[in-house]
Structures are given as C-alpha cells and as structure tokens.
Amino acid sequence: MHASNSFTEIFLKHMLLGLQNGVASKNMSFLQRKRAIKLTADVAMAFAKDGAKWSHALIMNLSKKTENRTLLRSILGREYERLTKPCLSWKMPRAKKILQRSFKMHSRIKKGARQLRGVNAASVRAGAAVTRTKVLKRLVPGGEHLDDSSLLEETLDYVISLRAQVDLMHLLVKALDVPNPNLCNKGESGEFLF
Amino acid sequence: MDISKKDKLGVEKSGDHPNYHSSGMSADQQLGNPSISLVSAHPMVSSPCPSVSMVESFPPSLWNPSAHSQNSGFCGNNVQSSMAASDSMPVGKPVPGPLRLDMGWNPLDSSSKGSGIFLQTGSGVLPPSLPHFPTDSAFIEHPARFSGFHGGNLNGMVSPFSTAESLSSYCNTPKGVLGAQIQQSKMNTTEARMDASLPIDHGSSSRSPRKEQRDKGSLHGAGVSGNESGEHVFGGGGREEAPNLASPAGDSSSKGLAAKKRRRSDQGIEAEQLQGGASLPSVDTTKDNLDTKQKPEQNSSTMATVKSNGKQVNDSSDAPKEDCIHVRARRGQATNSHSLAERVRREKISERMKFLQDLVPGCSKVTGKAVMLDEIINYVQSLQRQVEFLSMKLAAVNPRLEFNIEGLVSKDLFHSRGGPSSSIGFSPDMIHPQLHPSQQALFQAGMSSIVNPSDALRTAINAQLSSINGYKEPMPQIPNAWNEELHNVMQMTFGPNPSLNTQELNGKPCEGFPM
C-alpha cells in the first residue's frame, strides 16, 4: 500500500507540477494545451514507475523532440539528465543485430522450405502471433528490442500504468471542475460530484 | 509492544483458528462482492490488501481483541477498513470498531506489514516464533507479479489480483486461501521488504528449498519465505542483476532461488487456478508443470546446467519431483537441450499471457496466442486513446488553468517530499479560495482509493513476475506518510464539518470510470 501510495503520489505530484509550469496561466491554444497535458501525464507516469524499461524509453522518446524539453526538465528536475541518457543495455551492439538478422533469415528460409508441403493451422497461427507481436512492440514504448517474454512483461506493466493514468486523469477532471457558484458551501457540494 | 500485543491476540484467536481456514476459503470467493459494494468509496476492489495496509497504518487501534468472524471479517474487513480508513481521515482518529482483523488468513498473514496480529493469529498453525518474523519475509512469497503499481479502478479486473501476497508464503494454507491471498497482494510493501531481507535470504536460500518444509511451518516457513523474499529481492536487485545471477558464480544460489521461485510461482499459479475455479487436481498438475518450468527458468541462462540435467533425468516421470532443480523431460518428449530450453521459454510466455489475460477485461474465454495478443493490442490502444481524450477534457475543463495545486494536495505533501525531487518552490499562500474543501476532500479520498486497487493488482502481478525474472520495483517505501498527511489535511479542513466529508466520501464518483 505504501509503495503504491508513493506511485500515485509521485505521479500526481509530477503531473500537477507539470501542469502548473507548462500549462497554467499561459496563453496557449487548445490543442497546445492538450498536448502539454498529455505530455505531462505521460512523463509523470513514466517517472513514477521508474523501474520499468518502458518508462525509460518513453521519457527518451519524448525528449527527442526539442519543444518538449523544457517541460520535461521542469517536471523531472534533477532526474532529467539521468533519464534522458540512452540506456546502454538495450541498445544492442551492431554485430549482435546483424547476427540476429541473419539467424532470422536463415530460420525463415528453413521454414519456407518446410511450408511448401502445405499451410497447416499451426504455422498460420504462428504467423499471426508474429505480426501481432510486431504491432505490440510498436505500441509499448521501448518494446522493439525486447524478446517475447520480456515484451509481455513490459506490456503488463504498461497496461497497469496506463490504467492508473486514466483513473488519475479522471479524478483530476472531476476535481478541477469548477463548482457552480450558485451552490452553497455546505450540503450541496456533494451534488456536483455526480 | 507488538510482541505483547501479538501474544494477546494469539491467545485469543487460537481458539478460532480452525474456523478460519474454512471461512477463509469462502471469504475468498466473497472477495468479489465487497469490492463492488465498495464502489462508493472507490473500487478498493476486493483487496484485503488495502485493508491490511489500513490496518497497518493504525496498528495500535487494530489490536481489537473482539475478533470478528473470519468470514464476514474478511469481507467486512475490506469494506470496513476501507471505510474506516476513509473515515478516519476526516475524523482524525482511526476507528477501531469496524476494523476487523483478518484472522482467517492467519498462516498467510504473517507477511502483512507490521500486523503482528496476523502473524499471531497464525500462531495456531505456526510456532510463536513467527510473529517476530519481519513482514519482509512474509511478503515473499506471494506470487506477486508486478511492481506495486496501482492500476486505478480495476473494478472487475482486480479481484483476481487483489489477494494478499502475504498469504502465499505458507504452503499449508488451503488452496482457497491461496487464491484469496493472491487477491490481497500488496506488492509494493513486499518488495521493500524483500530488499531488506535479501542478505538473510541469501544465507538461508541455500538451505531449505523444499516446498514441503513450509508445511512444517515456523522457521521453515519463515526461512522459505525469507528465501523467497530474498529471491524476489534478488530478482528485484534489478534486471541488471539477473544476468549476474545467471553467471555460473551464482549457480548454486540461483538453484536454490530457482527452487523457491518455483514454489512461489506455484502459489501464484495455484491462486490463478483457484480464481478460474479450477479444481485442486488441476492445480497440482499445473504446479508440476510449473515446477519444471520454473526451475529451469532461473537457470536458463546457464544452458549447460539445463542440458546436463535434462540428460540426467532421461527417465522422465509423469510427476516430476519438486526438489530437483533441473528440468525434467516430460514423458514422451525430447530431452534435447534445445527443445528443453524452448519449452521453458514457451511456458514462460504462456504464463505471462495468463497474467495478461486476467488483466485485460473480457479475455478469460479467449484462448490462443494470436487472439489474446489481439485483445491486448486493442486494450492498449484504447487506453492510450482514453488518455488522449482525458487530456483534451482536462484542457477544456479549466480554461483558466489555475491548477490549485496547493488546494488539491496538502501543502505538507509538496513541501516535505517536493523538496528533493522538485526545485520548484510553492508559496504557501497559493491556496485559492475557489477550491472547495469538498473538492479537496474528494480528491484526496479519490487518491487514496485509487491507490488500493492498483496497488493490489500490481502487487499480485509483481510478485508473480518478480519470482520469474527478478523484476525490480524500486519504489521507495514511504510508510504512512501519505495517510498521515491526508489525515492532517482532512483534520485541518474538515474540523468544522466532518459530516460533509463522509457524505462526499460515500458518494465517490468512481462509477464513471470505464472499465
């Protein structure tokens, strides 16, 4: 509970920080504001969940665009430098990549030879899984370099984070909704909650 | 102080112990219901975990000798602890009455943080030395899956995950309890604990890897749980450490750890099975399968070990022994090292898919990798779209964009914790009068409730996953700070009108969350 508390805390705190710095009292167009809010939310989520690969990748992707950098810097504070440094562990050396590619080609050739006998259900299923895995890799930040099982794990983590983000933003929307000035202080404040 | 209290409780509860097991199992099934009834407060979701955590935060008040029946206690615990927790904030005092101790989960609860009571209640089964057992070791085991993260309102979804991880550590608990245990998982705390207990675990990990030893309870259970927690920590030591683990240097310890992970994952699998309503026999078979799967997982990096073991165990048996660390080739299957490793890999993937299946709503009936992946992709895409939509809504909802941060969250929170991580100073007089105290209450109540279900889910998932590959949750443990601060703020702002708070808290608007 406490650790999850701290996740929510960190998330919320950074989100509000970002919102205040990046968005509040600035003359921005609606779309700009929305972009800034989304950026804040994503960064806050990634920062709150600092142990995952996807969080690091997400921050890195966001920091690639220069216009995001100031906001990122304000939100992340001291961590900015650490987090925007590329993580060396998943930038595979080129030689390894070449090896992997050649291996895949080789296995594909082998499979092709085998499949000349006919398309069976298993191979079709396997093929479908592969394409979907590719799609999933694109969806989950930082998923391109991962193998299947760790990809699934990151997806799981990412899904949980996304859910928390959605819930938190829901909460923010409800909380920040300016109450009707006609409502008096005491008993009626509960009304607007619904 | 804890010890004395625990003793008292143990004496009182020991008589009720036999009831707890059975009630525990039924409580397990009831878990889903209280969560729904809790929607008003927030989908704390069937997580006794939050109740436990609530319990933890008010330990002095919790030692209520007036025990409550296990059954209702468990479910009631959820409801009431959550209510009590939310109530206590505005009221400024923990409400000991409604809070019920989960006596039923005695043997399992030893892991609950600081809740010596739980340990004590388990005393009927386990030796009294257990209560002293640090919660860390208790945490161990639960097949917590993911680093404690809260997924927000996981209304329907969380129930499978909300079991307390603490429950998993003890083998002798009935399977139903295990299931419930999973549902209560509180991963985050577990992980912190695991870090603490790592050194101990290393020492003990090499000792008793046998699962049966847990049944003997007490020290064994503690040791095992400690081992497992150590294992968690170990894995947690970070994925970076995993490769180190894999290196031959850590072979022996990794073997011990693998054995423990096996056990942990077994529990996780068992819990999963239970959730699916699987019968015990099926659990056993899956457990066996998992044994083979989990054992090599840890050693998968050391292919040589797997290979040699596989060849040694050529006389494949239908029921692989649990004390071996090597992979057993199943009857009729190739014992080639490649196929063994591939089988391990496949099983790992299928296990993860199972977790995802529980997580993504509406995927329980779906089988097959491709369809599952399809569903997962759709779900992730829909969540991302929701985030976009909500950010648009946020942009529109407050055109003046005066985010009353001071008003929304207590000043203390920012000042005390904002110091290290943010250089932005808030001027104390930023509180805008326009922000209603009701909004604040709503927000804070929402925040606290948002934490619980996600926490439970995360814990469950985390425990399981970390058992597999040492996924680390580096979240700092901030004990009670959040609660205390909310507490203070609530006291400050709601002193004059406590009734307002309860009204708002009861009318939590979380039903709007699309799940």
Image (cartoon, coloured by chain):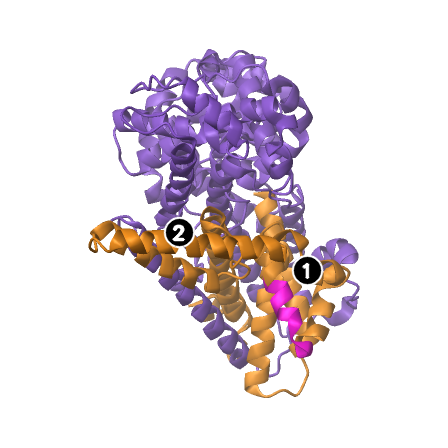
Chain colours: A orange, B purple
Residue B43 horizontal/vertical position (percent) = 42, 51
Residue A42 horizontal/vertical position (percent) = 57, 66
Mark 2: few/some/many CA within 10 Å (<14, 14-19, 20+): few
Q: Based on the picture, tell me whether residue A7 belongs to the magenta stretch.
A: no
Q: Based on the picture, tell me whether residue A66 belongs to the magenta stretch.
A: yes
- Chain under callout 2: A
Whether marks 1 and 2 lie on the same chain: yes
Which residue is the site of mark 1?
A86
Q: Position of B373 compared to B455: left or right?
A: left
Give the label, 1 or 2, closer to the camera.
2
Would you say the magenta stretch is mainly helix, strand or loop? helix
Q: CA distance from mark 1 to mark 2?
A: 31 Å
Q: Nearer the viewer, residue B334 or A26?
A: B334
Residue A129 horizontal/vertical position (percent) = 34, 55
- Kind of residue at disc 2: Ser
Mark 1: few/some/many CA within 10 Å (<14, 14-19, 20+): few
> Which residue is at a point 76% across and 53% down the rendered structure image?
B416
- Chain under callout 1: A
Above or below, A14 against B124 in this view is: below
Q: Nearer the viewer, residue B318 or B66?
A: B318
Element class at badge 2: helix
Q: Quadrant of residue B445?
A: bottom right
Element class at badge 1: loop
Q: Which mark is residue A107?
A: 2
Magenta residues (range)? A58-67
> Which residue is at a point 45% across and 18% down the rendered structure image?
B324
- Residue B169: in sight, yes or no? no
Q: Nearer the viewer, residue B34 or B198?
A: B198
